[in-house]
């Protein structure tokens, strides 16, 4: 992804081309300016950064320096947080001796970061101060080697919630206090001496600038800190007889004669899912090795609100949705029943056509990309109903016009009328994976591209979905549907591997049956069942789109079946739908209103 944390300013020579830039929604606080045609979000980093900006936005922003803390009325609370952080650093023996900085060594800098932690109701629960290293000055190959550290993805987490509901399991959350400080360093790293550390007697005569402190443990901000913490945690859990698999590296499972426990790791948040006795044992041995905070039943994790009902688990983002609407001044807008207007078949009248030659591009003061980022975070986590509309409007981030901005506002109006909509995983449901695939032929008529859409449900509720413009030009609806099925089958293979590993390792009995994937193009289904049929209309389609799916069917991993278009839930991800059909599909993938539960 080409994404800068832009400290960029608009230069005088660029002033005539300001439509290239856009200021962030918190520009007054952070001064960020984005370059529109450089932003991509294939890995979700941009949408997550916008989520963080919206989530932490307040009329009373967090302080950025110790001097700012001193001027605040809540200084005593910040002071206690700073003291707690220094105590943790000493307790974990993070700092080694203070020495004269060795030759050819560049010590990393440091800074204090201050954050007020909030709960699912956006109430401040605690003050947090963190001394972080300025890892941007680290040199690859000298100060660090590997930096990759896995984190649990949203699809796995949704599956675990569906498993907890269907098997009537408990779900608890624990937080590791100063998790990164447990990791050991493999490289010698020196840091500039932070305030509060006393100089040794033999170095008091020397200037502080030529001295540094050697780090003995990983510290927040270092590029390898996340990897070191993951290695430390996984080594400990594996020594306690947990099993782990590269398919889902952040899921650790331990089975016993009386039950099982699954620990799902997201950095320092540990979700424990399983039977009560095994969860209690896991909580005990985690507390023996690490300093932990026991947060009780999982109610708020990764920005998701989780409600536990007698008949199931409901996951939603109502509070975040309200903050998004308030941030873009749409919290008093008139609600709408669908996220998108029906598009005209006339290309010239399509409201979502690209910017025309005589059309004005939105200025840098219009937060188009910020709105897209905020909506994409919702669409990727709990709101598949806005996935297609958001994906379509995200294509025009480099040159958005007033028409596209009206499309964004249309989605906001839809959200205003469905704030508490989320995914409901019912209890005692059958834990069976079912897929739906569809293609919107020439969904982008301006570039002759079609749209791939698929959704996979477990127990009738969505766990994985996608809405994406195809990269190839499909010359017929049959060709487009074949590509969509190919993409759905690729996702299905991973989903089957992940779900089977978790269920088998937990001792949950599963039937090894092919996963049904429903498709509404009968010719496409026939071709994939009976084999590639060479004809004038199909000979140009690359055989790989047929052979891969056919092999999966032959190995009884998938079973492609025909379904009527009116019953195909994947329609939701390929086109704008009339209100009645839209609401039918939204309900069919397990989306419910909190007020109706």
Image (cartoon, grey):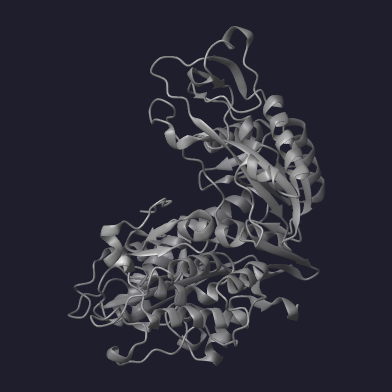
Residue drawn where x is 52% and y is 25% of the image: 191
x%, y% of residue 160?
64, 57
Query: Which residue ends up furthest to the left in the rendered image?
Result: 536
Position of 359 with respect to 159 (left or right) is left
Depicted 26 relative to depicted 209: above or below: below
Residue drawn where x is 39% and y is 66% of the image: 487
Q: In which quarter of the image is the C terminus?
A: bottom right
The picture quadrant where one finds residue 231 is top right
Visible in this render: residue 257?
A: no
The picture quadrant where one finds residue 562 is bottom left
74 and 544: which is toward the camera: 74
59 and 311: which is toward the camera: 59
Number of on-image labels: 0
x%, y% of residue 19?
33, 69
75 and 344: which is toward the camera: 75
Depicted 576 relative to depicted 594: above or below: below
Visible in this render: residue 333?
A: yes
Residue drawn where x is 62% and y is 71% of the image: 321
Position of 329 with respect to 237 (left or right) is left
x%, y% of residue 130?
64, 39
Position of 197 with respect to 105 (left or right) is right
x%, y% of residue 10?
35, 58
Residue drawn where x is 48% and y is 23% of the image: 187
505 and 426: which is toward the camera: 426
């Amino acid at each position: 992804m080409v994404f800068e944390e832009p400290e960029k300013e608009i230069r005088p020579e660029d002033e005539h081309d300001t439509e290239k830039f856009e200021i962030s929604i918190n520009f007054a606080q952070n001064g960020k300016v984005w370059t529109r045609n450089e932003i991509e979000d294939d890995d979700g980093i941009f949408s997550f950064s916008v989520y963080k900006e919206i989530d932490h936005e307040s009329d009373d922003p967090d302080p950025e320096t110790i001097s700012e803390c001193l001027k605040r009325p809540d200084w005593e609370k910040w002071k206690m947080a700073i003291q707690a952080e220094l105590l943790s650093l000493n307790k974990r023996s993070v700092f080694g001796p203070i020495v004269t900085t060795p030759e050819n060594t560049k010590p990393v800098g440091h800074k204090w970061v201050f954050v007020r932690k909030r709960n699912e109701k956006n109430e401040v629960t605690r003050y947090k101060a963190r001394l972080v290293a300025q890892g941007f000055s680290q040199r690859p190959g000298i100060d660090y080697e590997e930096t990759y550290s896995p984190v649990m993805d949203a699809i796995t987490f949704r599956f675990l919630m569906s498993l907890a509901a269907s098997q009537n399991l408990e779900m608890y959350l624990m937080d590791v206090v100063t998790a990164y400080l447990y990791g050991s360093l493999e490289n010698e790293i020196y840091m500039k001496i932070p305030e509060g550390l006393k100089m040794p007697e033999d170095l008091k005569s020397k200037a502080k600038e030529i001295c540094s402190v050697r780090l003995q443990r990983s510290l927040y901000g270092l590029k390898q800190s996340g990897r070191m913490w993951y290695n430390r945690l996984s080594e400990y859990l594996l020594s306690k007889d947990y099993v782990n698999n590269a398919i889902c590296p952040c899921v650790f499972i331990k089975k016993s004669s009386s039950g099982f426990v699954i620990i799902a790791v997201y950095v320092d948040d540990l979700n424990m899912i399983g039977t009560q006795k095994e969860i209690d044992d896991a909580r005990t041995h985690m507390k023996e090795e690490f300093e932990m905070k026991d947060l009780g039943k999982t109610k708020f994790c990764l920005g998701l609100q989780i409600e536990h009902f007698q008949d199931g688990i409901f996951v939603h983002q109502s509070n975040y949705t309200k903050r998004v609407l308030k941030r873009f001044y749409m919290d008093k807008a008139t609600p709408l029943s669908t996220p998108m207007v029906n598009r005209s078949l006339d290309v010239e009248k399509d409201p979502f056509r690209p910017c025309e030659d005589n059309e004005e591009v939105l200025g840098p003061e219009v937060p188009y990309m910020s709105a897209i980022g905020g909506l994409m975070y919702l669409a990727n986590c709990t709101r598949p109903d806005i996935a297609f509309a958001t994906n379509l409007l995200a294509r025009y981030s480099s040159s958005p016009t007033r028409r596209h901005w009206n499309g964004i506002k249309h989605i906001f109006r839809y959200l205003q009328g469905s704030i508490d909509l989320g995914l409901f995983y019912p209890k005692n449901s059958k834990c069976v994976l079912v897929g739906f695939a569809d293609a919107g032929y020439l969904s982008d008529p301006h570039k002759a591209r079609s749209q791939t859409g698929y959704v996979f449900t477990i127990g009738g509720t969505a766990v994985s979905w996608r809405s994406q413009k195809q990269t190839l030009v499909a010359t017929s609806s049959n060709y487009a549907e074949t590509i969509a099925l190919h993409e759905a089958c690729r996702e299905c293979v991973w989903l089957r591997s992940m779900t089977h590993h978790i269920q088998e390792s937990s001792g949950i009995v599963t039937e090894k049956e092919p996963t049904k994937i429903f498709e509404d193009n009968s010719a496409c289904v026939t071709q994939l069942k009976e084999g590639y049929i060479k004809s004038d209309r199909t000979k140009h389609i690359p055989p790989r789109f047929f052979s891969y799916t056919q092999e999966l069917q032959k190995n009884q991993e998938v079973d492609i079946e025909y379904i009527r278009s009116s019953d195909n839930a994947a329609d939701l991800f390929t086109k704008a739908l009339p209100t009645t059909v839209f609401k039918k599909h939204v309900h069919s993938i397990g989306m419910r209103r909190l007020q109706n539960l």
